[in-house]
Image (tube, rainbow, N blue to C red):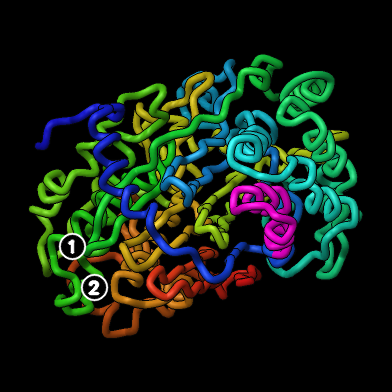
């Protein structure tokens, strides 16, 4: 096997920076700005900030904050995320890691009983399931280091919407119904997100005055308005009272980390994606490297789907074995993303027969997380995927703050080999430890060559990475963003050993051929994902954008 290289080899980083970034400094500017988000109010807020003279980074902060208000089932300032940034003036790129981290008092056996068995629900519901939020620190960091407008101006749209309210829509009703028990268990969550203890009807106005006050405190004092002082004491006291293990040190010591993105190539396209503690970039490059050896355009459709599934299978196996928080474990990034390693993985793929994953697990299915893509008129761009994990996170709102806490602790391996709520298994690399960041599937991504740029990503739990993969494959075939976001989807994650698929992804003939190869098929009751994509033709300057028809988002070009 290709020798394992260390992640922080400086010569490799400099080489990648020269290879991937230098051509971008001479690109023409777009003719318009484009924003695609999962909610029309967030899209409008982003464009509002651009009109005030802000750049894509200012708009990203505004969009993140508004989504934290109007999508409580997907993200929030009680959660975290990854913001992939590209600065047009010099081609600089970075991933802002605002991922949650485990409380310092957390330990490997936090969710196990005396017999060493995982206690059901303990890593999902209530404040013991919550990691230390990273989004407040990330928003302040991006605003200070990359934005152009005052932080208070950028947060103003979210503060206004939190005070005035937003109307409940059908997706809210579905998610609140799903998490009704958890929301009822928190008095504050019950009073904010439900109406008299029941799921509110469509059109009901959700007002969050306490969240507006919290956002205003951040606007006035920056990240310290959340992580320090009287407000931090209020959060810690409430979490401990409800059974959590947070401390003031947990909040005061939280830091945003800027990380070098993961990069690779596929059919002449340059891929830039999320680095650990996200598994997205490494898994994407692994899959694309495997597929590059098969000349996909010339392969018949059944075998093509089979090859994509086999690439998914192998990447997710490596995800479980190798990936975690890079500040706690050594990850062989360069090896896992090297074409030679992928060639070794591809060696045992048979064109007419499915491989077998060892073991099997059943799991629940969830919709969570949110994504947005932004391109401004200068060519700055942001791809950001944010989350509180399960819909409505832990279901716990800190009284008097409006802050809905995440349940990202479930993204750790509570016990090696035992699946989390999305069926993903993990090993020691992603075991719980105090101060550690949990592994994620969030995959904000740039795809480009000398003539075009794509900004894309999606929510979807364990299926995020494979959705982005399918979007990239669509782009490689010359299709536009509307095709990327609406493409019927399928997914394999090593365990359970099955192809999960949207009902319109395969016709009867395709299903029979895949089953003949030995694949186990599982049709899904619901569509999944909510991809948001922006496209820029650098040759003509024209810009396009698309929002997934599965959601209620909006893509807007101005």
The image position of residue 91, as x and y in percent, is 41, 47
Q: Does the magenta stretch include residue 360?
A: no
For marks 2 and 1, give the CA distance.
Answer: 8 Å
Asked whether the residues under the numbered discs 2 and 1 touch, taking CB atoms below 8 Å apart as contact, a structural biologist would say yes
Reply yes or no: does residue 46 show up in magenta: yes
Where residue 300 sits, quadrant-wise, is bottom left
Q: Where is residue 349 in the image (x, y as percent from the top left)?
A: 12, 58
Q: Is residue 123 left or right of residue 477?
A: right
Q: Position of residue 457 (x, y in %)?
A: 48, 58
Taking the image as drawn, is residue 124 in sight? no
Q: Residue at x 43, y 44 (%)?
A: 93
Which residue in the protein does label 1 denote?
A: 354
Q: Between 507 and 327, which is closer to the camera in this rendering? A: 327
Q: Badge 2: few (under 14), some or many (20 or more) residues near its Cα, within 10 Å?
A: many
Tell me if residue 177 comes above or below residue 411 in the rendering.
Answer: below
**Range of magenta residues:** 44-66
Q: Quadrant of residue 318?
A: top left
Q: Which residue is drawn at 62% across and 52% down?
A: 55
Tell me the tag on residue 237.
none
Q: In this view, does 226 lie to the left or right of 33?
A: right
Q: Dot 1 lies on which element?
A: loop
The residue that disc 2 covers is 514
The percent coordinates of residue 278 (x first, y second) are 43, 41
Which quadrant would the N terminus be assigned to in this image? top left
> Is 161 located above or below residue 387 in the figure?
below
Q: Going 14% across and 69% down the picture, which residue do you hit?
A: 295
Mark yes or no: residue 66 visible.
yes
């Amino acid at each position: 096997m290709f020798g394992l290289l260390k992640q922080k080899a400086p010569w490799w980083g400099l080489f990648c920076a020269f290879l991937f970034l230098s051509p971008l400094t001479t690109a023409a500017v777009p003719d318009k700005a484009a924003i695609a988000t999962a909610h029309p109010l967030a899209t409008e807020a982003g464009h509002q900030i651009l009109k005030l003279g802000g750049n894509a980074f200012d708009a990203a902060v505004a969009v993140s904050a508004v989504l934290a208000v109007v999508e409580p089932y997907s993200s929030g300032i009680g959660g975290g995320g990854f913001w992939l940034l590209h600065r047009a003036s010099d081609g600089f790129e970075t991933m802002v890691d605002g991922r949650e981290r485990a409380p310092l008092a957390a330990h490997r056996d936090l969710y196990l009983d005396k017999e060493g068995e995982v206690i059901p629900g303990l890593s999902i519901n209530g404040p013991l399931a919550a990691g230390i939020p990273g989004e407040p620190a990330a928003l302040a960091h991006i605003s200070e280091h990359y934005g152009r407008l005052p932080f208070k101006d950028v947060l103003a749209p979210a503060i206004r919407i939190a005070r005035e309210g937003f109307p409940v829509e059908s997706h809210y009703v579905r998610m609140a119904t799903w998490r009704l028990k958890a929301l009822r268990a928190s008095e504050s969550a019950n009073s904010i997100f439900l109406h008299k203890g029941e799921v509110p009807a469509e059109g009901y106005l959700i007002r969050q005055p306490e969240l507006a006050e919290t956002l205003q405190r951040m606007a006035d004092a920056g990240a310290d308005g959340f992580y320090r002082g009287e407000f931090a004491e209020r959060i810690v006291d409430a979490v401990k009272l409800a059974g959590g293990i947070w401390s003031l040190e947990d909040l005061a010591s939280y830091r945003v980390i800027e990380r070098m993105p993961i990069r690779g190539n596929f059919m002449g396209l340059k891929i830039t994606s999320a680095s650990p503690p996200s598994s997205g970039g490494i898994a994407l490059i692994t899959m694309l490297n495997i597929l590059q050896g098969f000349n996909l355009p010339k392969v018949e459709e059944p075998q093509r789907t089979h090859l994509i599934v086999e690439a998914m299978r192998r990447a997710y196996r490596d995800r479980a074995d190798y990936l975690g928080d890079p500040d706690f474990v050594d990850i062989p990034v360069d090896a896992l993303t090297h074409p030679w390693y992928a060639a070794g993985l591809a060696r045992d793929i048979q064109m007419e027969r499915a491989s077998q994953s060892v073991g099997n697990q059943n799991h629940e299915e969830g919709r969570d997380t949110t994504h947005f893509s932004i391109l401004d008129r200068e060519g700055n761009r942001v791809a950001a995927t944010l989350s509180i994990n399960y819909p409505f996170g832990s279901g716990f709102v800190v009284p008097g703050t409006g802050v809905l806490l995440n349940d990202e602790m479930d993204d750790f391996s509570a016990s090696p080999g035992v699946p989390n709520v999305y069926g993903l298994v993990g090993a020691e690399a992603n075991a719980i430890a105090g101060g550690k960041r949990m592994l994620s599937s969030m995959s904000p991504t740039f795809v480009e060559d000398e003539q075009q740029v794509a900004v894309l990503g999606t929510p979807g739990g364990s299926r995020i990475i494979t959705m982005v993969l399918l979007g990239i494959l669509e782009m490689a075939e010359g299709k536009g963003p509307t095709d990327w976001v609406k493409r019927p989807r399928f997914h394999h994650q090593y365990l359970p050993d099955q192809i999960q698929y949207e009902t319109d992804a395969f016709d009867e003939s395709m299903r029979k051929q895949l089953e003949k190869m030995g694949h186990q098929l599982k049709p899904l009751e619901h569509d999944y994902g909510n991809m948001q994509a922006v496209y820029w033709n650098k040759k003509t300057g024209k810009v396009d954008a698309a929002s997934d028809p599965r959601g209620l988002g909006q893509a807007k070009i101005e």
